Image (cartoon, rainbow, N blue to C red):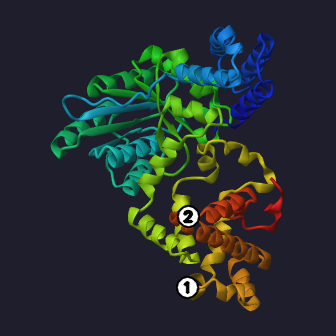
């Protein structure tokens, strides 16, 4: 996400860093680049203008221009203003003093309301331990009820439905009675997609609102529609007291204009963003973390939270012990590979690491999920004994031919994986000696990292990726 905007902004900052002390003209030129980048990212023109003006007011002061760290200070100013325009702090979901808390989902057709409803139910169940009831109130779209029931079964959340012959306001009223009887503390209502100009459906939504008195009215919009998403939010907000926005398909939106504009134009905060198709691909919207990603400074906090939610602590401790004893095998590597895949797509993971966003642009060195699948296929084509004793494969060409055939790869792919795995083990062996205060081990580790040995942490599966960084 934000790939185009991030690249343009980082290029502008690179020009500033190369100049040492800055002149007012240097800052003005950088601001022109920033404004162009924002407009290219489909940020509303008034937001782009106001944002760059606030940056200019702070950046052209003499105390900054005369500083040896002027470029860094300009980056900090841009970061702070991006955070401010996106709302400043995370906007959390409210809870009703008298359960159940009702969350009403609204939006246009095709924005992904049903999927977003299920993702939100899973998020609240997993992270806040709420007892959630999903309500199928979209009686117009073919198979909408069945879709919600299937998703509910996948995530283990109950779905209340009464078919397509009952009016949506009546369905919601019955669902609330069921929620009170069943002890549910949260009700998420999935409504039909509607345009703000469709008066009949807008009146129906008002009736649902009157019946349910929701604590939250969340508008689900497709981030890829850019300014159209903002216009939809503005139109709905004039008719309903929206409490928040969920931006879907953020993982496919390389521009990011909607995320940077919605709060400023409508006053309505973005509360969640959809980052993929899987049910766990819904993240709370943190303006400070997103600004950090845009500026290429990563998002380590979100990465840590993902890791804590997906990585088994006992397995991690066992792995640490094996590393200390230099007993790391391809079986262990396969386990770690699967743990990494649970964190999400690799391009997202790289974007969360400070300074690593640029790595995605290096075509010859790019690491993607297809390569991880190829590596996994190679390891799975080995016998358990071969995974535990990689030397057996290293010493036998016939084994390597068999493994390549079984995994649908080339022998050179198997050879490269074994070479990188061997380099990794040597690195771990040096690392294990550091606990004894070995300066030699520390020096060897640094040299290995500088020469590219550390790249084995994300091994590629094809010889084409040997290009120099």
Q: Position of residue 338 (x, y in %)?
A: 54, 65
Image label count: 2
Q: Position of residue 191 (x, y in %)?
A: 41, 34
Q: Is residue 145 visible in this depiction of the protein?
A: yes
* Disc 2 crowd, CA 10 A, few/some/many (<14, 14-19, 20+): some
Q: Quadrant of residue 388?
A: bottom right
Residue that appears at 78% across and 13% down: 23
The residue that label 1 is drawn on is 384
Of the 4 image quadrants, the one containing the N terminus is top right
Check the image and report above or below for 139 versus 277: above
The residue that label 2 is drawn on is 434
Q: On the rendered structure, is 345 left or right of 92?
A: right
Q: Secondary structure at mark 2?
A: helix
Q: Quadrant of residue 271?
A: top left
Q: Is residue 409 visible in this depiction of the protein?
A: no
Residue that appears at 82% across and 63% down: 464
Residue that appears at 49% across and 43% down: 302
Sequence-first disc among 2 and 1: 1
Q: Secondary structure at mark 1?
A: helix
Residue that appears at 64% across and 74% down: 377
Q: On the rendered structure, is 405 left or right of 382?
A: right
Residue 78 got which mark? Answer: none
* Disc 1 crowd, CA 10 A, few/some/many (<14, 14-19, 20+): few
């Amino acid at each position: 996400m934000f790939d185009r905007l991030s690249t343009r902004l980082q290029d502008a900052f690179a020009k500033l860093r190369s100049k040492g002390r800055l002149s007012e003209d240097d800052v003005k030129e950088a601001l022109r680049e920033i404004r162009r980048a924002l407009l290219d990212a489909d940020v509303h023109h008034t937001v782009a203008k106001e944002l760059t003006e606030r940056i200019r007011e702070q950046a052209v002061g003499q105390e900054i221009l005369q500083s040896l760290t002027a470029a860094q200070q300009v980056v900090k100013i841009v970061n702070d203003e991006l955070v401010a325009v996106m709302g400043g702090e995370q906007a959390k979901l409210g809870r009703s003093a008298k359960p159940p808390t009702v969350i009403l989902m609204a939006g246009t057709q095709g924005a992904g309301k049903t999927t977003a409803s299920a993702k939100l139910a899973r998020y609240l169940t997993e992270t806040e331990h709420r007892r959630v009831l999903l309500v199928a109130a979209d009686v117009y779209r073919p198979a909408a009820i069945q879709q919600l029931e299937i998703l509910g079964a996948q995530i283990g959340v109950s779905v209340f439905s009464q078919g397509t012959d009952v009016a949506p306001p009546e369905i919601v009223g019955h669902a609330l009675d069921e929620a009170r009887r069943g002890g549910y503390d949260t009700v998420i209502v999935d409504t039909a997609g509607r345009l703000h100009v469709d008066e009949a459906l807008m009146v129906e939504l008002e009736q649902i609102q009157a019946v349910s008195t929701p604590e939250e009215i969340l508008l689900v919009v497709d981030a890829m529609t850019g300014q159209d998403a903002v216009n939809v939010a503005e139109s709905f907000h004039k008719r309903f007291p929206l409490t928040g926005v969920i931006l879907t398909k953020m993982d496919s939106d390389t521009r990011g204009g909607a995320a940077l504009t919605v709060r400023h134009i409508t006053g309505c905060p973005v509360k969640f963003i959809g980052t993929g198709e899987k049910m766990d691909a819904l993240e709370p919207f943190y303006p400070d973390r997103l600004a950090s990603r845009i500026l290429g400074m990563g998002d380590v906090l979100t990465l840590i939270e993902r890791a804590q939610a997906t990585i088994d602590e006992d397995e991690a401790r066992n792995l640490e012990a094996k590393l200390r004893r230099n007993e790391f095998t391809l079986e262990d590597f396969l386990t770690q590979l699967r743990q990494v895949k649970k964190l999400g797509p690799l391009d997202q993971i790289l974007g969360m690491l400070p300074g690593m966003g640029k790595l995605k642009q290096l075509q010859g060195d790019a690491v993607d999920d297809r390569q991880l699948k190829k590596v996994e296929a190679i390891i799975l084509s080995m016998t358990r004994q071969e995974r535990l004793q990689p030397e057996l494969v290293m010493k036998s060409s016939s084994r390597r031919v068999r493994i390549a055939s079984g995994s649908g790869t080339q022998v050179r792919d198997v050879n490269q994986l074994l070479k990188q795995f061997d380099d990794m083990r040597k690195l771990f062996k040096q690392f294990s000696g550091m606990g004894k205060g070995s300066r030699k081990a520390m020096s060897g580790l640094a040299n290995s990292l500088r020469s590219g040995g550390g790249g084995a942490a994300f091994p590629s599966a094809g010889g084409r990726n040997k290009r120099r960084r």
